[in-house]
Image: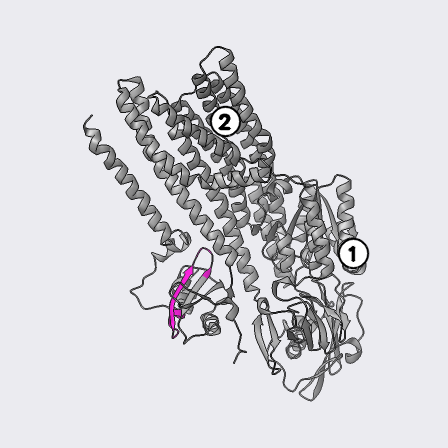
Amino acid sequence: MAEAIDYSIFVGKAEDGLAQMSLAIDGIDCAACIAEIENGVKALPGVVRARLNYSTHRLTVAWREETTPDVVVRQLEVLGYRAHPFAGRAEENEARHARWLLRCLGVAGFAAMNIMLLSVSVWSGNVTDITPETRDFFHWISALIALPAAAYAGQPFFQSAVRAIRSGRLNMDVPITIGVTLALGMSVFETALSREHAYFDSAIMLLFFLLAGRYLDHEARRRTRATAGNIAALRGEMAHRLGADGVPVLVPVQALKAGDTILVQPGERVAADGVVASGLSAVDESLVTGETLPRPLKAGDPVYAGSLNGEGALHLTVTAGGENTLVDDVQRLLDGALAEKGAYVRLADRVARLYAPMVHLTALVSAIGWILAGAGVHDAVMIAVAVLIITCPCALALAVPAVQVTATGRLFRAGLLVNAGDMLERLALVDTVVFDKTGTLTLPEPALALPRGADPALVALAGRLALSSRHPLARVVAQRADGAPLENVTELSGQGVEAVLDGRVLRLGSLAFCDAVAPATLPAGASLIAFRHGTQSLVMGIEQALRPDARQVVEALKARGLDVRILSGDRAAAVQPVAAALGIAVAEAGLKPAGKIAVLDALKARGRRVLMVGDGLNDAPALAAAAVSLSPASGAAVTQAQADAVFLGRRLGPVLSAVDGSRTAALLMRQNLAIAVLYNVIAVPLAIAGLVTPLVAALAMSGSSILVTVNALRAARPGRKDEANDARRGAEADALEEVAA
Amino acid sequence: MNVLVYLLPLALLLGIGGLFAFLWSLKSGQYDDLDGAAVRVLADDDLPQQGHADKGRARP
């Protein structure tokens, strides 16, 4: 019987008063899973609703009193799926925002179609025999549709423009808002005077195109975030909290508060920052500091979340509860690094900063110019409005987001979740790549290294003995077990485990305990564990194995002209062999978080743009300080929050895909901006000359927008050469993995 | 021109009908899970449920 788990902090109330909970589900691989999961959960007594979202792999369950959340989780385990409850309040807000954008898009689409219906009649009537009365009638109906529709569908732009102006900035939404408002106002005025030209269709079509771009952009980011949220939830961080009666209850880490006492069993990861209340042990802090040698602990010592407990059980008093677990030093460095980062300005914003004043100046100058040239004030204002509509940054506003959406979509399929929208732009400029070692170049979990000529049967026997130990090193050996755990195993604290099989004594533990001598064929820097079976003895190394494609990726990065380096918190003895194996010349070891920042600052001072790839808590400040940062999905949660993108899986390949993808994307963004600028160069003089009718405006705007969007779609297609390379790398990595296994 | 008197309101009504249909479908969550909707249609809900093992064997 599994230990009872207290999930109460994840349970919410549904609209109809039922208890409701969302779960992230792992293991969904085909459509048949939908019915299986839903029916399996609905079969539980008390469950009223179970609905699986196949896009996000989330299950929403609602139940009456008869069921408890852990019954649902256990039922899913029986069905063969790993599930973890989920409190996605931030995501709920995002979903609401996405629906709002879609509603605006729907309204704009409806209005654009109906107004275009009327406008086409007016345009064709203008060259044939439409009567002024009919034209006015059509214009008034257009106004009737356009004004409420623009008031509703334009909200995303109006609100953003107001926010930007309040904080003293200019963004693309400012010219959009001014352009749409002026175009509509002028059209109503013209209609009232029974004139020939009105721009209702242009204004609404503009909103429609812009909303389409904005919705796509938002949706792509939401999908990435949903996947990232699933990874975080499925990590399922739990802690044994000791109740007042001293009985441990398994609770999610989010439920921990400062002052709680938690029990950390041998071999368990520490769930929250705390101080040792009682117990003796040593912790592996490789995820926190990068150091792979265990640090001994006694009562009163601080312990950080993410450390791996050694052989002794610990009672900890929690100092930082829930999601706030973070080492003070790291937090301070992080704040400093973030304050410095604000320097990068998005390409689109840089263009907007130049573009918006220029547009308004051009419109003003052309109006004044026409008045000076002797035209009436009315004609001059009409021309100024035409200039504003033509320059309204439809193509310009689509130019960057459209590429971002397609490029992040492609990277998503390559196993890369992009957190920051401007990451692609920044990554394309990188000239130096800095890797952390532990968990980044190497796999997050340690691997067993055997001396040459080791007897497989002996290793398997050692594995069976190791199944009875909770020591981190023994757990690695236990993966080689070929049968059931041995019986009557005794654990001698600090030495190892012992058992008797067929009259012979078996021992697994320290070299002295097993009376063994380390052979010279084991890799340097590996932790050693010995096994003795009667007269036979075996010494095995536990080492951090390199990611299967690390060598190829490092080579490929170098081939692209990037300077590759290692900055590690680990000992030099552990770092040098890795650097040598990967052919990396510059490798610095033994760096504290502040030391890593200092190195990055020195690089920055020399004008380098650095991509930092790291996973540990000690890397978080360095990630924030670097120009761009990547983190593997196995990394610490805080670190991932700082990273611009997170990559999945055992391979390092996504790092290379990210570099390549960002370079393609940056090229396409520049092309798109060039197209948008070219369009302006042609259309603006026409507008200033007073030659732009509503028909020309409609054609020019939709034409340039479509051109930009089609060009952006090229980012979704990898080049032929890339694809062949990717396939080859994948195959090589698979082969290597098989050899290693 | 008299034809406009009923054609225009008719066109507008049709458009508004489409808009409301869209808003309703949005509100009832039909755009929340586009991948799921595509595969749910293939599920035979009138047949007895197959177990996970069957599904596993059926797959290549």
**Place of residue A496 in the rendered image (x, y in percent of width and height, measured from the top left):** 73, 79
Residue farthest to the bottom?
A503
**In this rendering, the label closer to the viewer, 1 or 2:** 2
On the same chain: label 1 and label 2?
yes
Q: How has the structure been colored for display?
A: one colour
Could you tell me which secondary element the residue under label 2 belongs to?
helix
**Place of residue A215 in the rendered image (x, y in percent of width and height, measured from the top left):** 46, 44
Which picture quadrant has residue A649?
bottom right
Query: As rendered, which of A737 and B51 lies closer to the eye?
Result: B51
| Residue marked by disc 1 | A591
**Place of residue A418 in the rendered image (x, y in percent of width and height, measured from the top left):** 57, 49
Which picture quadrant has residue B28?
bottom left
Amino acid beneath label 2? Thr
| Residue marked by disc 2 | A391
In the rendered image, is residue A703 in sight? no
> In the image, is residue A397 part of the stretch drawn in magenta?
no
The residue segment tinted magenta is A40-58
Q: Earlier in the sequence, mark 1 or mark 2?
A: 2
